[in-house]
Image (cartoon, rainbow, N blue to C red):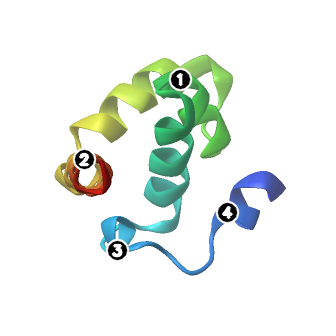
C-alpha cells in the first residue's frame, strides 16, 4: 500500500466502520472525485488491473453499504 494510502488510515468516520484498510482507502478516494480507477490506484492496485479491481471493489457489499451510508449522511446534512 502506498504511503499516501497509509496516511489516510486512522480514526474512521461512522460510514467506514466495517471496511478493511484497502476498502477504506478505496472508498475515501472514490468519494473524493467519483473516479473508480483512480481510487483503485490510490488503494494500491496495479495500473494494469485498476479498472477491473475498481469494479470488483464496488461489487463488495461492505463497500456499497459504506458509499450508501456516506451518501445518506451527506443528504441528512443538507
Residue 8's disc number: 4
Asked whether residue 31 appears in the rendered view, the answer is yes
Between 32 and 37, the one nearer to me in the picture = 32
Q: Can you identify the residue that label 1 sits on?
A: 37
Label 3 vs 1, first from the N-terminus: 3
In whole angstroms, how far apart are the C-alphas of marks 4 and 3? 15 Å
Mark 1 lies on a secondary structure that is helix
**Relative to 73, 46 lies left or right:** right
**Relative to 71, 32 lies left or right:** right
Whether 58 is drawn above or below 28: the answer is above
Q: Can you identify the residue that label 2 sits on?
A: 75
Asked whether residue 2 appears in the rendered view, the answer is no
Label 2 vs 4, first from the N-terminus: 4
Q: Nearer the viewer, mark 1 or mark 4?
A: 4
Q: Report which quarter residue 52 is drawn in.
A: top left
Q: Position of residue 27 (x, y in %)?
A: 45, 47
In whole angstroms, how far apart are the C-alphas of marks 3 and 1? 24 Å
Amino acid at each position: 500500500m502506498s504511503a499516501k494510502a497509509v496516511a489516510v488510515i486512522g480514526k474512521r468516520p461512522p460510514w467506514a466502520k466495517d471496511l478493511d484498510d484497502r476498502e477504506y482507502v478505496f472508498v475515501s478516494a472514490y468519494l473524493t472525485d467519483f473516479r473508480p480507477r483512480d481510487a483503485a490506484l490510490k488503494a494500491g492496485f496495479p495500473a494494469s488491473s485498476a479498472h477491473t479491481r475498481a469494479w470488483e471493489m464496488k461489487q463488495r457489499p461492505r463497500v456499497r453499504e459504506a458509499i450508501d451510508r456516506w451518501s445518506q449522511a451527506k443528504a441528512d446534512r443538507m
